[in-house]
Image (cartoon, grey):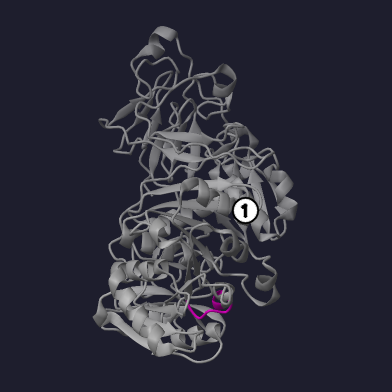
Amino acid sequence: MSTEPEIHITPNGPIEVRVDLPIVPKRIVRSEAGEPITWATDPALPHRTPARLCRCGESGIKPFCDGSHKAAGFDGTETAAIESFAAQSTTIEGPDLRVHRAGSLCADTGFCANHLNRWKDLLPRAADPDIRVELASMVQHCPSGTLVLEMAGEVIEPDLPRAISPVEDGPLWVTGGVTIVRSDGITLETRNRVTLCRCGRSANKPFCDGTHNAIGFQAKNERTAATVPLTPGPAGSPPVAVPGAAPTAPQHRVPAYRRVVVGVHDATTESTFRAAAMVAEASGSEVALAHVGSDAPEVILEEALRRAEAAGVPAKRITPMHERGDPADALHAVARRRDAGLIVVGRGGDRLARLPARVSHRSPCDVLVVSRAAGDRPRRYRKILIATDGSKTADRAARRGYDLAAALGATVELLFVGHPATGDLILSDTMAVAAGAVDTIPRLLRGEAAPLILASADRAGADLIVVGNKGMTGLRIRAGTSVPGEVLKGAHCDVLLCRTVTQREADLEPGDGGVIERDGEPVAAWMDESGELRLMSAKCTHLGCTVAWNPGTRTFDCPCHGSRFGPDGAVVEGPATKPLPPV
């Protein structure tokens, strides 16, 4: 790290940025209740080096200095303690973690509390994984570094770029370990995140102490990016919004499904064949027409072949077959034998009304349940609603939904139902890992998951709901008490139930990676261009979180603290320092 002065506090004058440091305006995104949700980033500001940034609060060209400090008689004398953070902070213990706090550095941005909890209230309950995620979100969103999280003896810091960010109506947020020198020549402790006063009224100069809030300081960003409208939550909960950052288009995207099995019986509708044709066209799939549930297989299959071709499935990709036995078991058997990634099944007539739920129960692959009448369905899905619960297995469902959206040119509404602090992290991570170039509207709601998923799909006019099939086992699915079961039962559109346990080796192709299961453990798998499969532990070597494959960067990414590993397991980006070990 550089020891040269990069930011210099001039005597009673501006902040001088002496290196070519990005100046990137930030905004706090709030709910209608005024609670901070996350940070939004506006376009970087062009500037010369050195750049002079106002800290008297009077400049007419904020964030840059126009000399107003001279006319205003600005007194910028630094009064903040020069001791290290460790010397200034107190430590509060929690279960297997600590939070260090230096109250004098607080910039009063409000991320450390909401209408339900404060960070200090969460700390004693942090053994609960959900509580721990919420606490970590509060601590890591703090721009001033007033709060610092320590886990397993290691300080956990957010991965922040080297930049200086004028916060709208707030301080200058310096990130990434930039050297700051006071006007008297004393070099301050270099930290990952600090906030410098720019309203001119802080009692803890050069640091912000939150006075900008009390005096109503205004410093609007010159260029403001569009925001996502607030989404009203259920009665009694505040509306919240999550901004969607423009995603980076992936360099590589595998087809959604290479082999598809279509359940065919005497009540199969035109909409089922149209859905199968759409998937086959988008993915270049081989399609097996598996006859189940009828005593006239030859007649039914001949008609099914004609209807599939009429719907748009090329004849050369179709294989008709008859499978005896229980219809659900028969479709599972065909899917296993053909190593299929998807079963397409319609809701059927009275006799097979429960077939979709039974097929989804312990399915060896994803299941697309088709519900719309043929005359009421678009040629392609135009809007897809992907529901995620933040579990380790939900990542694959989101990726499958995004793969399909990318292939079809559809837009996505990405929905999380739960606590805003948790949802902010999950929605951001999911979009960063899976969205690619797909247009996405993120939504965050609070309440009961299944009814909100169904209501959101109806409101958005979704053609497809994508959920994981976790929980669809045993008596729960028969009783209809699991979230995917309730969604399947109540949906007015098609439903894609993704097998979220693991990927399979058959899902991989040369140049692709994923997380599969071996002996009950998650394994990071990479298939090189020659088709050779390399297997490594899927546990991040930092703190043991399960990594996920990022098709855009071709890396295994840790969703907890941002570590990245190459296809061979080598560390690409910390905080991890050790590679993924081979298995």
Secondary structure found at label 1? helix
Magenta extent: 359-365
Amino acid type assigned to the residue bearing label 1 in the image: Pro
Category of crowding for the residue at label 1, using alpha-carbon neighbours closer than 10 angstroms: few (below 14), some (14–19), many (at least 20): some
Q: Is residue 375 left or right of residue 426?
A: left
In this view, 349 is above or below 61: below
User: Residue shown at 50%/81% (left/top)?
Assistant: 364
Residue 272 location, quadrant: bottom left
Look at the image and say whether residue 503 sits in the magenta stretch: no
Main SS of the magenta part reads loop
In this view, 431 is above or below 5: below
Which residue is the site of mark 1?
Answer: 451
Residue 60 location, quadrant: top left
Looking at the image, how many numbered discs can be counted on the residues? 1
Q: Residue furthest top?
A: 71
Where is residue 145 shown, x and y percent of the image? 55, 42
Where is residue 15 shown, x and y percent of the image? 39, 27
Look at the image and say whether residue 364 sits in the magenta stretch: yes
Q: Nearer the viewer, residue 332 or 303?
A: 303
